Image (cartoon, rainbow, N blue to C red):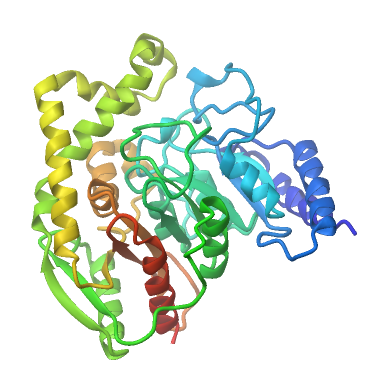
Amino acid sequence: MSACVEKARAAIARVEALGEAAGRLFTEFDPQRILADAAEADARIAASATALPLAGLLVSVKDLYDEKGARTTAASKLLRERSPAAADCPVVARIKAAGAVPFGRTTMSEFAYSGVGLNPHYGTPGNVFDADRIPGGSTSGGGVSVALGLCDLALGTDTGGSVRIPSAINGLYGFKPSQGKVPLEGVHSLAASFDTAGPLARDFATMLAAYKVMSEDGDASAAPATGRLRLAVPENAFTTDLDDWARAHFDAVTHRLAAAGHELVPVDLGFLQAAIGLNRILVSVEAHRIYGAHLQELETVGDPRVLARIRFSETVGEDEVQAAYQARREVVARFAEALAGFDAMIAPTLQRRAPTIAETEANFDQLNAAMLRNTSLLNLADACALSMPTRDGAAPATGENVGALMVGAVNGRDAALLAVAARLDADLAR
């Protein structure tokens, strides 16, 4: 029995048929290594007395996760010559033990430091609906690899929205767990106070199965929440200044959820929007701690847009940094108070439709901030959050008629949030 090997061979052929476009999706694509992993998966599945939860699934791996024998480069020229990893990181080891097959290392925004997915070293893939529009970042190659059907899952990371943004743009399900739920050992960091690791998939069940393996969260189940849900609908944050695309999708979703019998309650979360500048300070400071000794080299080999974001920390004094950490702690506590008594919060994942790659290259700062705005507010609040696709009407799936709903909850309520999201997904599907 060689089901995994045969599935991998077919998928490898699909990638190779892409030609040079595959180089915009993968920083490394080694068919020999993939087939060896597939043979090991076949043997592991055959030897298991019980069904393995990810048996036979192909999983693309963001180029932040250590895989034994591969270089973890964060899609940067700076790290291309680093030594190959001596061992699989815990997340990769877990998905392999669950019967999955690692399937290529995916491109991303350099160092995972943007929400749009541009990368000057490998090129930027268009999204699955429109090749001229951004894929979303930073898990750009991961999102597109799943949306194109090249693999079943992607391992992503989320520091300011880097799982949820590419999921939203490419019509996928993406989950940002609470910090501490998924181990980050062997996952290259951007900002340790904000980093999380999560999965992207084409359907809710596959995403949930992947999260359960990645986290070993025994409380997460496939059972949707029951009864009438009480959902917070933000005011003065998340829902302000939406473009027509985002507004139409969110209005349609809230109408459908109210019609399904759920209680939607306006909640003022303006304090989050007012504090959004804390992310810029703290992520830059923590990224600078990692790359500060390499700034001169990055002037030559780095993405200048990423370098400018790292260097922003040089304009901030230590007193301001400490004040920012304290202010964030207060925001986290206030968010928990605001959501007390609610099953979850709902909001548009994105403030606007994905811009074109050309528009984004010409106006990076403004458009990157716009794409990150809603997702990064929940990183600021140290929350857990999920993005799910919503479709309007019976027309074929396109970037126009596929919206994205974000469902969020306070840190540690991952299992409850997933149960709520499963229920909302089922209600919206009706």
The count of marks equals 0
Q: In this view, does 241 lie above or below 111?
A: below
Q: Is residue 189 above or below residue 301?
A: below
Taking the spot 54% from the left edge, 59% from the top edge, the residue there is: 212
Across and down, in percent, residue 2 comes to 87, 56
Q: Is residue 168 above or below residue 266?
A: above
Compared across the picture, whether 311 is left or right of 357 comes to left
Point out the residue furthest to the right here.
Answer: 1
Q: In this view, does 290 lie above or below 45?
A: above
Locate the C terminus by quadrant: bottom left
Which image quadrant is residue 275 in?
A: top left
Across and down, in percent, residue 209 comes to 57, 63
Across and down, in percent, residue 77 comes to 51, 21
Taking the spot 39% from the left edge, 16% from the top edge, the residue there is: 298
Q: Answer yes or no: is residue 241 visible.
A: no
Locate the N terminus by quadrant: bottom right
Taking the spot 25% from the left edge, 26% from the top edge, the residue there is: 285
> In the image shown, does 422 or 25 lie closer to the viewer?
422
Compared across the picture, whether 197 is left or right of 278 comes to right
> In the image shown, does 62 or 421 lie closer to the viewer?
421
Taking the spot 66% from the left edge, 59% from the top edge, the residue there is: 54
Which image quadrant is residue 360 in?
A: top left
Q: Answer yes or no: is residue 411 visible.
A: yes
Across and down, in percent, residue 331 comes to 14, 48
